[in-house]
Image (cartoon, rainbow, N blue to C red):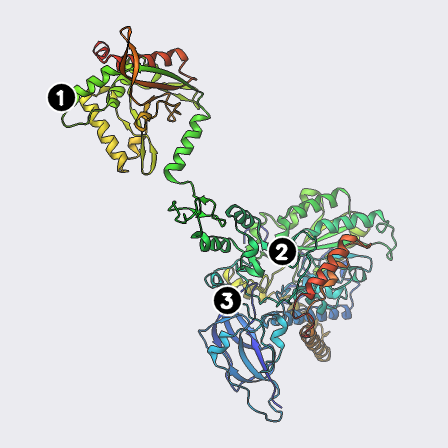
Amino acid sequence: MPSFQRFNLPDAGEGLTEADIVTWSVAVGDTVEVNQPIVEIETAKSLVELPSPYSGVVTQLLVAEGDTVEVGAPILEVDVDPDGEPAAPSEPVQVADAVAEPAAASPSAVAAPVAPSQATPVPEPAPASAESEGSGAVLVGYGVKAGNATRRERREGSLDPIGGAEAAGQYPVLAKPPVRKLAKELGVDLTTITPSGPGGLVTREDVEQQVKATAAQTLATYPEDDQPWLASGTTTRDGRSTRVPVKSVRKRTAEAMVQSAFTAPHVTEFLTVDVTETMNLVARLKQDRDFADVRVTPLLIVAKALLLAVRRHPEVNAAWDEQAQEIVYKHYVNLGIAASTPRGLVVPNIKDAHRLPLHALALELQDLTAEARNGSTSPRAMSDGTITITNVGALGIDTGTPILNPGEAAILAFGSIRQQPWVHEGEIAVRWVTQLALSFDHRLVDGELGARVLADVGRVMNDPSQGLVWA
Amino acid sequence: MTAGGPLSTEGLVQLLTPAGERIGHEQFDPHTAHLTPDDLRAFWRDMTLTRAFDMEATSLQRQGELGLWVQSWGQEGAQIGSGHALNGQDWVFPSYREHGVALTREVDLVEVLRIFRGLQHGAWDPADHRFHLYTLVIGSHALHATGYAMGMAKDGMVATGDPERDGAVVAYFGDGATSQGDVAEALTFASVYDAPIVFFVQNNQYAISEQATRQSRVPIADRGKGVGIPSVRVDGNDVLASHAVTRWALEHARSGAGPVLIEAFTYRRGAHTTSDDPTRYRSKAEEQLWAERDPIARLEAYLTAAGELSDDYRTGVDAEAKALCERTRATVRGWTRADTRGMFDHVYAEPHALVDAERSWFERYERSFADTEVPR
């Protein structure tokens, strides 16, 4: 009786998932011998000639030239007993069906006769990611990323873990250490994930997918509050935190602050000043026709005061060169102004501010602020600063202990200006008062120098006419 | 080929030309004097059987019956020649391509395939054949072999003058392995301890796709000079020369004179493994050149010219080869799922609590699969 055997596409390499049929060298009706070459296939690794495992007469070619066939799918049918008694012809199999139903890829399945009554093997659908990786180039001996192997079906019931460490009824989750770490960080329970990796391995993508699926879950900081207030980042599975990668301005700020705070020994000195005269000057300038095109603020006067102080004490306008073991004294002042922007904190500076008359300085300040506000501050504007002012007063704050902009030796914090009872000319009067704080790098600026600089700023703020004397 | 490099043919000991003509060699001719025509025919038979088996195994891999196969095609001369120089006391530490040597140690070649079907790490008792299990880690066994040789010396199995007692070790590895630290360490230990060991390097010219010129600037045999080990370069496609040189080296080692390094210059005619595609790194012309230097054809030409290879003998060997292939095919197809419990059996010589616990857990794990009792 005719006896039909099918040849399933083998894995000709190690861990291949599919191959292209290049050329059939036999046709239906041909007699074939064992090990006679029957078909040439192209795998991700090489062109390979497959030899027939059976001798007999070819009864069906189940795939066509040019087809891409999954490993394990039948490609050829041979009648290994053509001289036997005739029997009902075997069920013809459509090519497409054959491809769509890969049989088990285990070696023993290859030799097993295909009978309709045979239990359907358990095909493990290849994960979506495998399709893109399956045909990629593969190093000899390394296989492909996603396995094509069919997985053995498990019985129902439990299996005690060997160490008893895992809960009964659970087989330990398979995942590589970095993936476990990621899952822990993201608060993902690995046992809740359906693995997509080879051999039931939970992959990084699985974990990320799980997080994405649950990202929209509650951010219930307050009852009835389920609207995420953070646009970016990843919500942890428990919905109790959001993780945002540190990028761009935030990252640069962090690096600059760490570098500065942990290399330059900071000293901060404070001075409380009666700035009523400065406020009067600002009011006058606002009325001045020459200043009609520009916004005059107390910050302008502070900037001028600092420039005057630097002129009297140029040693404060300097930098520490650790590598060269030198102090670099700058003969120019690029005056930095710390600015809060939509992108984060930036410190653009006014180039050669020491040469600018008050009106030009006001214009530069205005431009700088406008650029910072609309996020168009150029990298050049942020480089090569020599000394900086941070206007904490704009936020209603009295003062602070600012951290130096890296590469500079001093930074002036300018607090809020408020009316306070103040002893003026021997009597208590309501005066405009502010606090100034100067942080400096004690490696090159001693307390005395710092004090003199701060005192000079204060003196000009207290009595702007002093500027006439020092200018 | 760089003159004087690892692919040079200078200084190769050769007793048979590629055309099969016998040429004389002062030092090594005496080591062929014991060979009868029967012995030479046996060489030819063993090479033929090894190749037939190799081809059958390659087909079986292509048919999905084996996960991987490592061809010995083209290296039969070096393997059969050296294998037949071994005595009953000698020990062999092979790498993974030494199917010909396995045959000379009377290992049933079919059993070798259990490794390549993923059923077992090794299917023969090494002590029965004095042929260690295949080592897949490149070069690591050079150290095991050296240690074993040092042990044989300590056990008084060397330099007694008793041919029934004296033995040595042969470690087989390839040109690629010579770049491994393990091999360098093994050479050093063997040298300074005068270990009775022969390092038999089959320089098949490729470490997978990397040519031997990437392993060495000089012939691999020259490695011996640096550590004070006498070395010989032999034409590995000349079964007679391979035999004579190995016989000399083994006598040297068994006599207590210390190690020898043999470089058998040969060519891997097949792929590195069935997962490799050699057309990506070598030319058809090169393959053709080496097809013309084939070791089997060479001995065949010599025996035929000498009138020592009768048609009857040929027919007999062909039938034997066919039977071996048919038995191989039938046996491999008959193999079912591995008895995985066996993997716990040889971890420790004595019973061991942890291994027992792991074995019983693993049995329960295996039973948790639906197909466990389903015959396949």
* Residue at mark 1: chain: A
Residue B217: image x %, image y %?
58, 47
Query: Which numbered disc, 1 or 2, marks the residue that appears first in the sequence?
Result: 2
| A317 vs A56, nearest the viewer | A317
Location of mark 3 (residue): A43
Instruction: Report the disc number at residue A288.
Output: 1
Asked whether the beta carbons under mark 1 and mark 2 sit within 8 Å of each other, the answer is no
| Helix, strand or loop status at disc 3 | loop
Give the residue type that dot 2 points to: Pro
Residue B346: image x %, image y %?
77, 57
Residue A463 is left or right of residue B36, and the answer is left
- Above or below, A66 against A187 in this view is below
Binning the other alpha carbons within 10 Å of mark 1 as few (below 14), some (14 to 19) or many (20 upward) gives few
Location of mark 2 (residue): A172
Give the residue type that dot 1 points to: Asp
| B197 vs A191, nearest the viewer | A191
Residue B174 is left or right of residue A382, and the answer is right
2 or 3: mark nearer the eye: 2
